[in-house]
């Protein structure tokens, strides 16, 4: 017991930025998920994020389209969401990045942002 | 027996034409399925069946359209037998969705969102005056197109930017009700 609390005190002494307090604000299962990702990254199982290339989200344009036909298929009838993100790179220069999503992909995209909002609110 | 062979032929045709499997050559199919057939004879059969499958796939025929189409083919000069029609119908029922998805995929040559990961960081803004800790979401998007290497986009979103994004995404979802 004594050894245990000495360890806790030693760790607490290292906690200069009040990190422990911040961590306690994060939902437990989400924190566990984050730790798992960090471990995987350290074990070279997943790529990390290069913050030198981090861009700021500026704005988004969108359109909803339906691909009707193509040279290989006269009856495609494929709905999709086309998006153009305006992003500012670390130097401040704004560029456009465009991509498309199928409807299921869009729904997943939307769901992820809702989850993000929920987590941001909690922290 | 003839049905199984035709079914095999249709699978082989689908492999090259729709599933991108270049290994299934005409020679391979002939050797495996109709080894006794003369090459020109087999080529004609393959072309005929391939043509029918292409018509069916291009129109993405539903069961009614398929039945009408195949019935017409059985009545034509140099058309197909009703046994062959049955085999083709069964094949299309089993492969329709996958073939259609493959045709869609072939037509999407612009950037597609392949994957998305995100995490939330606590950003420390000032060490000296106030410990204002802003949470930010770091999002990594993998954008790619057919046959090219993916491009990774890393974006930072604070709470306000996520709200801005959500508002736009809601607009998109609303517009989807007309689909």
Image (cartoon, coloured by chain):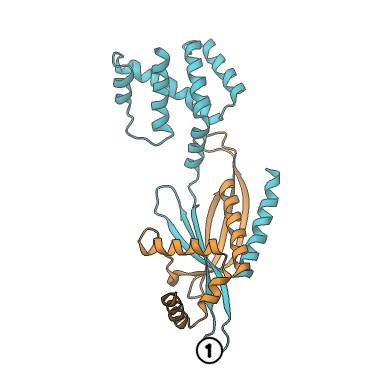
| Closest to the observer, A110 or B19 | A110
Residue at coordinates 45% horizontally, 50% vertically from top-left?
A: B145
Residue B122 visible in the current orientation: yes
* Chain designation of label 1: B
Place residue A52 in its image quadrant. bottom left
Residue B139 visible in the current orientation: no
Asked whether, in this view, residue B104 is left or right of residue A117, the answer is left
Question: The chain coloured cyan carries which letter?
Answer: B
Q: Residue furthest front?
A: A1
Residue at coordinates 58% horizontally, 18% vertically from top-left?
A: B67
Question: The chain coloured orange carries which letter?
Answer: A
Which residue is the site of mark 1?
B128
Residue at coordinates 40% horizontally, 51% vertically from top-left?
A: B148
Q: Position of residue B93 (x, y in %)?
A: 53, 25
Residue at coordinates 30% horizontally, 25% vertically from top-left?
A: B28
Asked whether, in this view, residue B67 is left or right of residue B112, the answer is right
Q: How many marks?
A: 1
Quadrant the N terminus of chain A occupies: bottom left
Q: Position of residue B173 (x, y in %)?
A: 67, 51
Q: Position of residue B178 (x, y in %)?
A: 70, 44
**Badge 1: few (under 14), some or many (20 or more) residues near its Cα, within 10 Å?**
few
| Closest to the observer, B121 or B164 | B121
Quadrant the C terminus of chain A occupies: bottom right
Asked whether, in this view, residue B20 is left or right of residue B90, the answer is left
Q: Secondary structure at mark 1?
A: loop
Asked whether, in this view, residue B135 is left or right of residue B84, the answer is right
Q: Position of residue B160 (x, y in %)?
A: 64, 70
Q: Residue furthest bottom?
A: B129
Q: Is residue B55 above or below residue B74?
A: below
């Amino acid at each position: 017991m004594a050894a245990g609390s000495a360890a806790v005190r030693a760790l607490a002494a290292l906690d200069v930025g009040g990190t422990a307090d911040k961590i306690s604000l994060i939902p437990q299962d989400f924190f566990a998920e984050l730790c798992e990702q960090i471990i995987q990254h350290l074990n070279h199982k997943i790529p990390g994020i290069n913050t030198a290339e981090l861009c700021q989200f500026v704005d988004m344009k969108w359109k909803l389209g339906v691909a009707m036909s193509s040279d290989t298929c006269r009856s495609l009838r494929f709905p999709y969401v086309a998006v153009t993100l305006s992003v500012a790179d670390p130097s401040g220069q704004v560029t456009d990045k465009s991509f498309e999503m199928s409807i299921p992909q869009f729904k997943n995209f939307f769901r992820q942002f809702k989850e993000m909002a929920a987590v941001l609110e909690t922290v | 027996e003839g049905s199984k062979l035709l079914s095999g032929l249709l699978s082989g045709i689908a492999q090259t034409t729709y599933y991108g499997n270049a290994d299934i050559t005409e020679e391979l199919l002939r050797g495996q399925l109709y080894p006794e057939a003369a090459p020109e004879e087999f080529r004609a059969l393959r072309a005929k069946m391939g043509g029918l499958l292409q018509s069916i796939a291009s129109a993405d025929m539903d069961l009614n359209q398929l039945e009408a189409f195949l019935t017409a083919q059985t009545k034509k000069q140099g058309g197909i037998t009703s046994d062959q029609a049955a085999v083709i119908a069964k094949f299309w029922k089993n492969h329709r969705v996958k073939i259609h998805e493959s045709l869609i995929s072939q037509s999407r040559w612009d950037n597609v969102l392949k994957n998305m990961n995100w995490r939330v960081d606590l950003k420390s803004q000032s060490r000296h005056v106030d410990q204002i800790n802003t949470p930010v979401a770091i999002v990594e998007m993998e954008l790619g197109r057919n046959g090219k290497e993916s491009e990774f986009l890393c974006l930072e979103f604070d709470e306000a930017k996520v709200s801005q994004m959500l508002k736009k995404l809601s607009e998109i979802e609303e517009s989807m009700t007309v689909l």
